[in-house]
Amino acid sequence: MHGDYDGFQWKIKNSTTATTTTTEPVTLTVFTAASLTGAFTDIADYYNAQSNGITVENVFDGSQALRTQIEQGAEPDVFVSANTKHMNALVDEGYMDNDTVQLFLENSMAVIVPVDNPANITTLADLANDGVKIVIGTADVPFGSYTRQVLETMNASDEYGPEYVDAVYANVVSEETAVSTVVPKLTLGEADAAFVYKSDILQEYKDQLITMEIPEEFNVVAKYPLGILASSENKDAAQDFIEFVRGTEGSAILEDYGFDPIPEDQ
C-alpha cells in the first residue's frame, strides 16, 4: 500500500489480463491525463484488438480540465489522473465509485532541452542564466505543480537557494496546461528548456531532445490514480479495462513509455 494521500485511502487492486466478454457492444469513454497520451493510445489499441465487444475511446487533456468537465456534467466511464489532488476532489464530491479508485503508476520530473541546445544548457544551474527561455506547466495541472515542488526543494537547499529559483522563474516564458504542448515549443525553437515528466520524452522525439536528470533529493514522484465513475453504466467493462491496464501487457506498455507501474502487492 502507498498509504493516505490528502485524506483518502488509496487501494491497490489485484490485476489480471482482460477476460470480460459481452454480447452487446460497449464503448468505454476514458478521461485520461495528457501525460499518458502515447501509452494509453497503445493500451487502448491492444485492448480493443483482443476484447470481445468492448471499445475504449480515450479523451486526453490536463487532469484539471478533465476534472472540470466531469464537474460540469460530462460522464466518462473511467478517469485517469496525473495526481491524487483532482481524483480526491471528485471522490469528495461523489463522482467516483470509491471502491474502484486505486494508485497504479508513478512518474518523476526531468528537464529537457532541444538537441541543438541554443542556450548552451549543460547543468541545472544553467537554467538561471540570463536570457534562457523556460516552459513549465500552470500551477493547477500536475506537471506544473510538481515543477514548483522541485523548485521549492531547490530553493531550500545550499546548492541552489532562493536566488537561483527566482532567476529560473524569471526565465519562464510560457506556462502550459498540458504536457503535450510543451515538447513542440522546444522542437520549434520557441523555448530553450522545459520541466516535464520523464515519460514525456517519447521515442519519436528522442533524437531531437537532450534529457537532464533531476537529482533524487530534489525530484518529486508523481502518483497516478484511476477509477470508475459512479455514473458509469458500464462498470463491469470498465473494471475489465482497468485490470488490463494493471496486468502484464498494460504494465509493459507503460514501462516502455518511461513510467513505473506500482506493483500489485504494494
Image: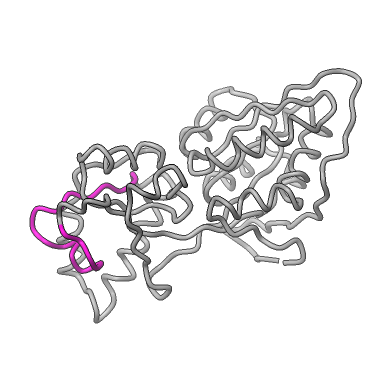
Query: How far across and down, in percent of the image, does residue 32 sit?
Result: 57, 37
Q: Is residue 45 left or right of residue 73?
A: right
The image shows residue 49, relative to residue 26, as above or below, that is below
Q: In the rendered image, which quarter contains the N terminus?
A: bottom right
Q: Residue furthest left?
A: 130
Residue at horizontal 53 percent and vertical 24 percent from the top: 72
Q: Residue furthest front?
A: 207
Q: Is residue 138 left or right of residue 69?
A: left
Q: Residue furthest top?
A: 24
Query: How far across and down, in percent of the image, does residue 191 sit?
Result: 21, 45
Magenta highlight range: 120-138
In the rendered view, how is the structure colored? one colour
Q: In the rendered image, which quarter contains the C terminus?
A: bottom right
Give the quarter of the image for residue 54.
top right
Q: Nearer the viewer, residue 113 or 67?
A: 113
Task: Look at the image and say whether residue 152 sits in the magenta stretch.
Answer: no
Q: Is residue 140 left or right of residue 246?
A: left
Residue at horizontal 20 percent and vertical 39 percent from the top: 190
Q: Is residue 241 left or right of residue 221?
A: right
Give the quarter of the image for residue 24.
top right
Query: How far across and down, in percent of the image, does residue 55 sit?
Result: 73, 25
The image shows residue 188, relative to residue 88, as above or below, that is above
Q: Nearer the viewer, residue 251 or 30?
A: 251
